[in-house]
Image: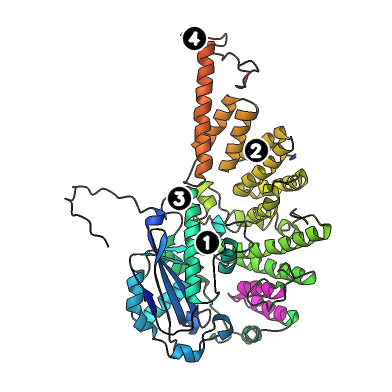
Amino acid sequence: MLYPGDDNPQSRRQGTGTASAAVPAPSVPPQAPPPALPERSYAVLDTETTGLSPARGDRIISLALVTVEGGRVTDRWSSLCNPERDTGPVHIHGITTEQAAAAPHFAELVPEMLRRLRGRVLVAHNAGFDLLFLASELERAGHDWQPETVVDTLRLARRFLPELDNHRLGTCARALRIPLRAHRADSDAEATAALLLHLLGVAAEEGHTDLSRLGDPGSRTLRLARRRAVRCDAAGEGLAAGHRAAHQTLERWPGSAEDWQRALTALTDHQCPEAARLWIRFSTWLTGTGPDSGGRGGRRGAGHGPGRDLAHQALTTALGLELAAPEPDREEIGGVISQIAHLDAAEAADAADAADAGGTAGASPGRLLALFPEPAGLIAALPPCDSCWSCDTLGSCATGSPAGALVAHYAAALRGPAAGPETADELAGHLPLLEATGDLAALGRAARFVGQVWEKHGREAEAAALWHRAVDLGARDVVLFNRLSLHYERRLGDHATALAVCRRALDGRRGRGARAAWDAITKRAARCRRRLSSASRQAYPGPSRPSPQGRPEAAGMRPGGEESPGA
């Protein structure tokens, strides 16, 4: 197909039930619907720690809980915590060993903490990290509590704020103008609570009425966090000499790219389970896009020239390692893809600056395009995450999708009021790549964006043909169906074909997302039925006036259901 925190070591508290009348129990108790999203009670957690791995002896040194009920914050509590060791990187969290030594031990905080956690949905940004440390400290204190349900605002932000370059808490807070003092548990928890309320509002607009597709069981979150935890370092037992030496080099934080590469290559050769993560860290060191970069990034936050090329090589190596894992993790892969996309976005922005082109897409996303057809096809074939918006609404997973990242590269330019056909044509030229990978979610979204721009520039027939092509291939983008049915109803007056498109969309509906678009399609289908019925009655008022072919022909309708000018 040719396409056309606070330093006070003391705990701080401020707290705020209703009894229900007893009723006779029926013989078969009815299943009450789950509470609506705003009515749920949430405990928003943030921790500061001495390092990244409780398995290596890292401990919690500060934690905060913010309670959200009825759509508002009702309680705040936080405390420093004595880790019985040094506090680690003071330059990150600002807590000295002397301050922490004067704080309560974790076991002393457990009763107050569990009182706020029990019966509530646990919320955190990158929830696996905080839950992993919380579970470790609780186990050490002789408790085995786990949350029933966990909501990770990092995952929700990736789902409902796809336009952001990354979804770190600081990035989300800046985008939504949420106050934040980074790496202070109380401030982080407060910002996460505000982010949660925003994301729940977006989810409600998309049709979500409960947490069935927004949260995960606490046991699953903890299991995945343990699998992703640091598992190998220089202190590990049974390491080969070269393997241990490579870890020792990286722990000294080498100052040259050559030292990084030698150590990382050794880890890869020794099949170190940390190799992929450390290759990614090397890329952030090169480009200045991560907390370990030391400010080496350029004005756009992604370095320049050779640094980007070397970062791309590091990310490609990391991606290969992630895909070679016994159970590839879509979310881990998604982190690599987002870093690659960020390199392309930085180069596009530089190209736009050089051409004084404003908000255009700039340079083509060559690094993302290099992922096609493989490994993009391999990623598309992975089991779905079953938790993203795309899984819920379209039946096609978008987590870790290179095709989705490719479409997102063009999306901002194509959604703008000054979107030109050149950018749309460029994305249209990449549609065969999306088709070849079988990534139907990305294909539908791309076709929608391209077609909308073509419509604005008088290329309605091309837009409709493109939309039909995507739908026939299996794309289930609800907005795509909405645009296509609107095209037939309003532009062509073809109510029969518009109704057929609406029926096809409604027959394949899944989940509760994109409620506004579904409502529009449902209303359009009813409207088209009324118009077709009215046209039929006007043409054939009698009970039996069959056409020569044995079926009624609506007067004033062209073949295919299009109204004639006089109808």
Label 2 and label 4: CA atoms lie apart by 37 Å
Mark 3 belongs to which amino acid?
His
Of helix, strand and loop, which one carries label 4? Answer: loop
- Provide the major secondary structure of the magenta segment: helix
Given this view, does label 3 or label 1 mark the residue nearer the observer? 3
Which residue corresponds to mark 2?
467
Label 2 and label 3: CA atoms lie apart by 27 Å
Label 1 and label 2: CA atoms lie apart by 30 Å
Which residue corresponds to mark 1?
155
Which residue corresponds to mark 3?
208
* Label 3 vs 4, first from the N-terminus: 3
Of helix, strand and loop, which one carries label 3? Answer: loop
Of helix, strand and loop, which one carries label 2? Answer: helix
Q: Please say whether residue 508 is visible from this viewpoint.
A: no
| Label 4 crowd (10 A; few <14 / some 14-19 / many >=20) | few
Label 1 and label 4: CA atoms lie apart by 58 Å
Label 3 and label 1: CA atoms lie apart by 16 Å
**Quadrant of the image occupied by residue 250:** bottom right
Give the image location of residue 302, x and y in percent. 72, 68
Q: Within the magenta stretch, is there residue 269?
A: yes
Q: Residue at x 66, y 45 (%)?
A: 449
Of helix, strand and loop, which one carries label 1? Answer: helix
| Label 3 crowd (10 A; few <14 / some 14-19 / many >=20) | many
The quadrant the N terminus occupies is top right
* Label 2 vs 3, first from the N-terminus: 3
Mark 2 belongs to which amino acid?
Trp
Give the image location of residue 31, x and y in percent. 29, 49
Q: Is residue 456 above or below residue 249?
A: above
Q: Which residues are magenta?
A: 260-286
Mark number, residue 541: 4
